[in-house]
Image (cartoon, rainbow, N blue to C red):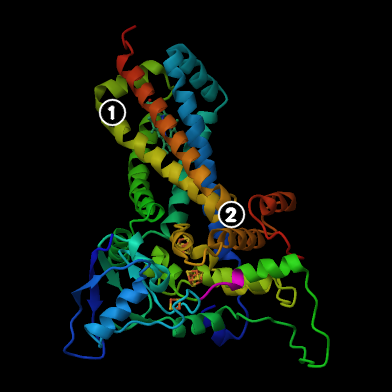
Amino acid sequence: MNASTITLHVPQRSKIAGRMDFFQMASGVLLILFLWAHMLLVSSVILSPSLMNGIAWFFEATYMAQIGGPAIFVLMVVHFILAARKMPFKQDEWKTFRVHARMLQHKDTTMWLVQVISAILILVLGAVHMFVVLTDLPITAAKSAARIQSGWLYLYLVLLPMAELHVGVGFYRIGVKYGFVGRSKRKWFQKTENVMMIGFITIGLLTLVRFMLLNIQG
Amino acid sequence: MNRMLTLNIFRYNPLDPDSTPRMQTFTVQEYDSMTLFIALTQIRDEKDPTLKVDFCCRAGICGSCAMVINGRPGLACHTQTKDLPAEITLHPLPFFQLLGDLSVDTGSWFRKTGLQIEAWCHSDDKAFDPTAEEMRMDNDLANEIFELDRCIECGCCMAACGTARMRTDFLGAVSIMRVARFYLDPRDKRSEDDYYEVIGNDQGVFGCMGLLACEDVCPKGIPLQDQLGIMRRMMAMHSVKGVLPRPLIETIKKKGCCHAHAQS
Ligand code: HEM
Ligand code: SF4
Ligand code: SF4
Ligand code: FES
């Protein structure tokens, strides 16, 4: 309800607010699934570089990388636009929330600030990462290793924990916001999510170590 | 262990042009089973009668003594000093209009918001017949409604909500829970469309960012998290009817917490 609907004397039957909320949630879910799949596929290099090469070849032969890659980028931008409606871009909103979070000392409230900051970092670093990888197809373990050994490591050392934090907190929040996880399961869900987050960051770091140690000449 | 308590209390009279916001320190001798309500009454009786604090029932029923206790909104009469450190900092609830010191006006906001969400049974405007037999209700359903009716409108949930602090037109968990209460009530004839009109927007269910501070501070333990989730899912699924396939909507609707005894 707002002033314009009162003066028009007609009930507002627009469903747009609900649809935007739903698609913000749905795009988040898809990105979470993507990130988990992505992490598992790339980490195949830990087992063997040729396994990773094989997987990469499969994704290109089926055009999943060429089409799926840009599609994920579009999904990321759509998700950002929908979620940014909630972000405290106005200075007074930002200040109010900061002061509030400091007063309350409440984990879920503070984690929202983490989500806002990690979102900006992922948007920029993720875009750079996708551009670099997708403009240099085919993906091979040797090319990735060469990239990471030539200084891109630092980008990944920021992108990895930021992406995992964002996705982890986002996963938890979708669960509670939409009532998929009720009061009785909240503690359990929080714990599960933390374990998953630590697990994924560990796998990611191991993958980076593997890339650092990979012999590029060989 | 009877400690000497130090209370740092926010003082400000917005009606007095000479008054500036400041903190004032009082000391109180603690005794067994002392509540914050007792400590504050003692300060007002013995040290400073001008201290503005609201109390009525001193039993967690009227909702008037809510304040920010060491950063957390809570009821003064419901808080024992033994559960707090020896140094206690008290602020008035944010979000609501300050009347002075620790006293805020929650009533005007609750009244305004109650009108906005139309917090009454909409019974198709049938004239009330005082001679007719009362409508019967299933006992389990009555209990489920009563669980939500226990809210004392203290305002702690609003003061703890980061969303409400940033966007002051946010209706908050308490209003959404209130709408859920009427949704459960078979005497309320409103349709999902009608409910969507009052809370299906960014001031209502879609504004909530799931911070769950409301859930964590509510002194009455009202199931705010569950009600927010149920209503948001219901309203969101209502909005995508015709966009998503019906079986998918039905599946999502049934996932997670639900109203156990709702009829419709
Ligand atoms: C479809 C687009 C994408 C493709 C094809 C892709 C591919 C890759 C590849 C091949 C690597 C290994 C390192 C390298 O070669 O430089 C990698 C690492 C990484 N990517 Fe992506 N990526 C994509 C999108 C994303 C997005 C959207 C995110 C963030 C949400 C992301 C986060 C990461 C992270 C954190 C790492 C480091 C992983 C690790 O340490 O295992 N990627 N990606
Ligand atoms: S829901 Fe809880 S915190 Fe909010 S006004 Fe009611 S009793 Fe107070
Ligand atoms: S869950 Fe929603 S209503 Fe409750 S504190 Fe968070 S944003 Fe506010
Ligand atoms: S005085 Fe009534 S709730 Fe505290």
Task: State the residue at coordinates (20%, 79%).
Answer: B21
Query: Residue A41: x, y in percent?
Result: 49, 24
- Whole-number angstrom distance, CA of label 1 to CA of label 2: 40 Å
Asked whether residue A133 appears in the rendered view, the answer is: yes
Q: Where is residue B149 in the image (x, y as percent from the top left)?
A: 60, 73
Identify the element where label 2 is drawn: loop
Residue bounds of the magenta highlight: B148-152
Q: Do the residues labelled 1 and 2 touch (CB within 8 Å)?
A: no
Q: Which kind of residue does numbered mark 2 sit on?
A: Gly
Above or below — where is A210 with respect to B188?
A: above
Q: Which chain carries label 2?
A: A
Residue depth check, mark 1 versus mark 2: number of the one nearer the observer = 2
Specify the principal SS of the magenta part: loop
Q: From this viewpoint, which residue is outermost toward the right?
A: B132
- Horizontal side of residue B66 vs A28, given as left or right: left
User: Is the residue at mark 1 in contact range of ligand 1, meaning its CB lies under 8 Å from it?
Assistant: yes
> Would you name the residue on which mark 1 appears?
A152
- Does residue B174 lie above or below B227 as drawn? below
Residue drawn at x 33%, y 13% is: A214
Q: Is mark 1 on a helix, strand or loop?
A: helix
Q: Nearer the viewer, residue A214 or B144?
A: B144
The residue wearing badge 2 is: A179
